[in-house]
Every structure is written in structure tokens, then in C-alpha cells.
Amino acid sequence: MITIRPEQSKDIAGVRAINEMAFDGTEEAKIVDSLRNACPDAVSLVAVEDERILGHILFSPVLVSGGQEVTRGMGLAPMAVLPERQRQGIGSMLVQTGIKEMRERNCPFIIVLGHPEYYPRFGFVPASNHGLSCQWDGIPDEAFMVLILDEAAMADVSGTARYRGEFDQAM
């Protein structure tokens, strides 16, 4: 049986390996390591079966700045599943559990830079629909998405969404 739980210190090597395999490189794994060390507000979850880590998802603070106002939400990135266990619902379990956790934390929104055919099933829509833009140039509109968790808190929020500086090394 697969369970989703918070990452523990014993999971670090497995989380790193999953991110390296899923993304075919070390960039995402380095970002996760950096955020783990520098960002106490990050939320890191793992999918586990028989003590084996099958997947990982990370949420870290993002800021939307528009005019004088700054609104804090979370960014979903990265999300990784062992290549041989992809397309078995593990990623969906991670995303759904993460969204539930963000709701419980009263997070007003989650942004993601991801596959436009995958994330809409969880309620993500192009961020531009809500007046939000990505800090990085050249990102396709359909790939930069948002899930609004608190409509009232986000009613007048628009502007540029900024990830933590650790993500700049990959962009």
C-alpha cells in the first residue's frame, strides 16, 4: 500500500535519487537540497511503499507582487516519481495530498510551472486567467498555472509571481 507522508531525514538520499532519475539530471535535486536547508516553510512529501520512496513533491513559498501589495502563496515544484512507477497514480496522490495540506495551512494559492495536460485535472488553470504572470520570460502561458484556494483572499491580487532564489539556478 502506498502512503503519503512528510519527508524525514532518512528520506533525503531517496528523494535526491528520484529527482535525478525523473528529471534525468541533478538540477531539481539541487534545488530540493537547497530549499530543504534554507527554507523552513517548505513542505516536502514522499510517497512510500514498503519503506521504499516512490515519489516526492515539494511546495515552497512564492510571492505575488502587484503595486504596493505582496501576497504569499506556495509553488509546487518539483514533483517526481520513479520512472518505472510513473502513470500509476502516485503523482496524483502526491498532488492531491499536497493541495489538501496547503488548504489546511490556509494558503491562498498554489502556482505550478508544469505540463498543461496534467495539472488541470487538479483544478489548475493558466495563471494569466487570474492576472498572474511568471517571473521568467519565455514561459508558455498554458504551462504557468495557478490553483486558487481562497477566492476572497485572491480577489484583487494580480502581478508577478516570484519563486525563491533557489529556483533561479535552474532557469
Image: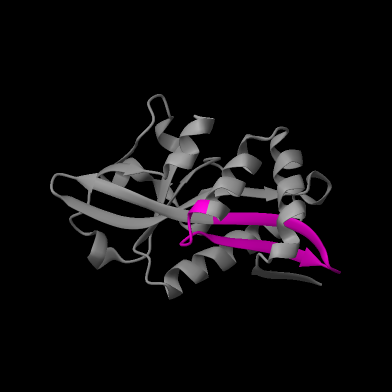
| Labels in figure, total | 0
Query: Is 82 situated left or right of 133 in this image?
Result: right
Residue 75 visible? The answer is: yes
Which color scheme did the rendering employ for the protein? one colour
Q: Position of residue 61 (x, y in %)?
A: 41, 54
Q: State whether residue 121 appears in this view.
A: no
Residue located at (80% from left, 51% from top): 85
Question: Which is nearer the eye, 46 or 165?
Answer: 165
Asked whether residue 41 is drawn in magenta, I would say yes
**The residue positioned farthest toward the left in the image shown:** 68
Q: Residue at x 46, y 67 (%)?
A: 102
For the view shown, which residue lies furthest in the top direction? 138
Horizontal side of 78 relative to 160 (left or right) equals right
- Relative to 132, 6 lies left or right: right
- Residue 165 lies in quadrant: top left
Query: In the image, what residue occupies the spot 38% across and 50% down?
Result: 62
Expressed as whole percent of the image width and height from the top left, the position of residue 147 reads 41, 56
Between residues 37 and 127, which one lies in front from this camera angle?
Answer: 37
Pick the front one: 156 or 58:
58
Magenta highlight range = 38-58
Q: Residue furthest right?
A: 50
Magenta stretch: dominant secondary structure? strand
Q: Write the residue at 24% across / 46% down.
A: 65
